Amino acid sequence: QVQLVESGGGLVQAGGSLRLSCAASGVTFRDYAMAWFRQAPGKERLFVARIMPAGTTSYADSVKGRFTISRDNARNTMYLQMNSLKPEDTAVYYCAARPLRTTDYNYWGPGTQVTVSS
């Protein structure tokens, strides 16, 4: 049974930093692309960043240069380092996994709240 659990969310002032973690179980971690999405109140869930097993990354334009996605395949864990946070980064952040050579993220964590105060 696949399980993803996020941690590390919280309240931070604008300009501050947070590091999110996503622990995966029930999967062969190296066989999955991993990603972060976020959903602000009243808005749709949006892509934030993705990382492939070998470390190739991609980012939404809104977070480029401020956020860094990484993964530790030995620990079945993915991270999102968020720097220079802005109030518009306030959202519930979700980690997601999809098997390689597929397009849909099948597995999702319950989410962790990130709130950035101005």
Image (tube, rainbow, N blue to C red):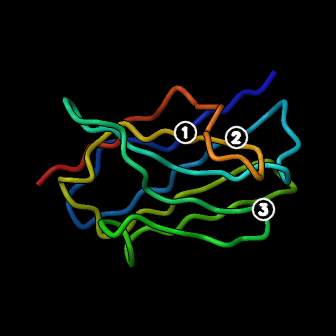
Q: Outermost residue toward the top?
A: 1
Please state the total of marks drawn on the protein image: 3
The part of the image, by quadrant, that contains residue 72 is bottom right
Q: Which residue is mark 3?
A: 53
Q: Earlier in the sequence, mark 1 or mark 2?
A: 1
Circle 1 crowding by C-alpha within 10 Å: few under 14, some 14–19, many from 20:
some
Q: Earlier in the sequence, mark 1 or mark 3?
A: 1
SS under mark 2:
strand
Does residue 2 sit above or below 102 in this rendering? Answer: above
Q: Position of residue 14 (x, y in %)?
A: 20, 60
Q: Earlier in the sequence, mark 3 or mark 2?
A: 2
Assess whether mark 3 and mark 1 are in contact (beta carbons under 8 angstroms).
no
Q: Position of residue 71 (x, y in %)?
A: 70, 60
Identified at 72% across, 27% down, the residue is 3
SS under mark 3:
loop
For the C terminus, the image quarter is bottom left
For the N terminus, the image quarter is top right
Does residue 117 sit above or below 15 in this rendering? Answer: above
Q: Which residue is mark 2?
A: 23
Q: Which residue is mark 1?
A: 7
Identified at 77% across, 51% down, the residue is 100
Residue type beneath disc 3: Pro
Q: Nearer the viewer, residue 46 or 77?
A: 46
Residue type beneath disc 2: Ala
Circle 2 crowding by C-alpha within 10 Å: few under 14, some 14–19, many from 20:
some
SS under mark 1:
strand
Assess whether mark 2 and mark 1 are in contact (beta carbons under 8 angstroms).
yes
Q: Is 41 on the left-hand or right-hand side of 38?
A: left
